[in-house]
Image (cartoon, rainbow, N blue to C red):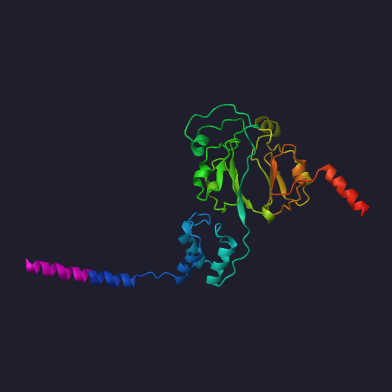
Amino acid sequence: MYIAIILLGIIGAIAAFILFVLSKKFEVKEDPRIAQVLEVLPGANCGGCGYPGCGGFAVACVKAELLEDLSCPVGGADVMKSVAAIMGKDAGDTLPKVAVVRCNGTCDVRPRTNKYDGAGNCSIAASLYSGETGCSFGCLGLGDCVDACAFDAIHINLQTGLAEVTEEKCVACGACVKACPKNIIEMRKKGPKSRRIFVSCINKDKGGVARKACSNACIGCSKCFKECTFGAITIENNLAYIDDTKCRLCRKCVAVCPTNAIHELNFPPRKTAEEKNEKQLTTSND
């Protein structure tokens, strides 16, 4: 009996020694910079960077030759500067972005044609039918984007039935974009002083059909396209789109849109005709 116990002990010791030798021989040493990068990352693990969590992003930063194509949406430019300092590289300029909901079809302008009585989930509803209104492109309002957001930055307005973004909380992780089966949520440049202009519609139906389904729909009339002198607006599939890299925020397109499909956010109120005339009189008197 004692001999068997001794033999088992010897075999166990030999096996442990072999495992120790093999572990040292095939040991994969981790670059210490990975841990350093992880320390400066926000730890949100949102996946907005395109990698599986902050750990995956840290590995990508260490392996990358350049950091220009890498960005932490939660940490922003400050975090990327810290990462660049650790890596001894240039982080480049990262423009802050924010999610925008490209649907302007509130309950008042998009009449209901039927009532959905199924699972309270946008993905399921979108796979079963086109929606409760004549517009098959608009927001379903069942909150998949709300469930996907880990930062409480998006919610459903019960009066309008549309998703709304709280830009102060939005970190541009893109989770809501991926969650929306209608593809109406887009990441756009936050803009100077958080000012943005975009077409709040993705309806690709012809003008008359789109307008009948929603009075705020883009009808592809091209008035905004003709008004823009910066080449920022294109018309494709009966729908206008504003390129935020070319837009100069002049707001001329907003003024000519006949359906109010173009939204302007965080701009000062436009001056009335009386205020403009008063200013002209004051200037002439001076």
Going by the picture, which residue comes out furthest to the left? Answer: 1
Q: Is residue 247 above or below residue 262?
A: below
Locate residue 207, reporting x and y percent: 70, 34
Foreground pick, 222 / 178: 178
Q: Is residue 108 left or right of residue 222?
A: left
Q: Is residue 284 above or below residue 116?
A: below
Residue sitting at 69 percent across and 40 percent down? 261
Going by the picture, which residue comes out furthest to the right? Answer: 285
Q: How many marks?
A: 0
Going by the picture, which residue comes out furthest to the top? Answer: 114
Residue sitting at 51 percent across and 48 percent down? 149
Residue 27 in view here? yes
Which segment is the magenta one?
1-15
Foreground pick, 136 / 252: 252
Q: Is residue 97 magenta?
A: no
Q: Is residue 13 magenta?
A: yes
Residue 65 in view here? no
Locate residue 102, reporting x and y percent: 63, 43
Quadrant, the N terminus: bottom left
Locate residue 179, reporting x and y percent: 52, 45
Quadrant, the C terminus: bottom right
Task: Give the quadrant of residue 222.
Answer: top right
Q: Main secondary structure of the magenta part?
A: helix
Q: Is residue 39 above or below residue 227?
A: below
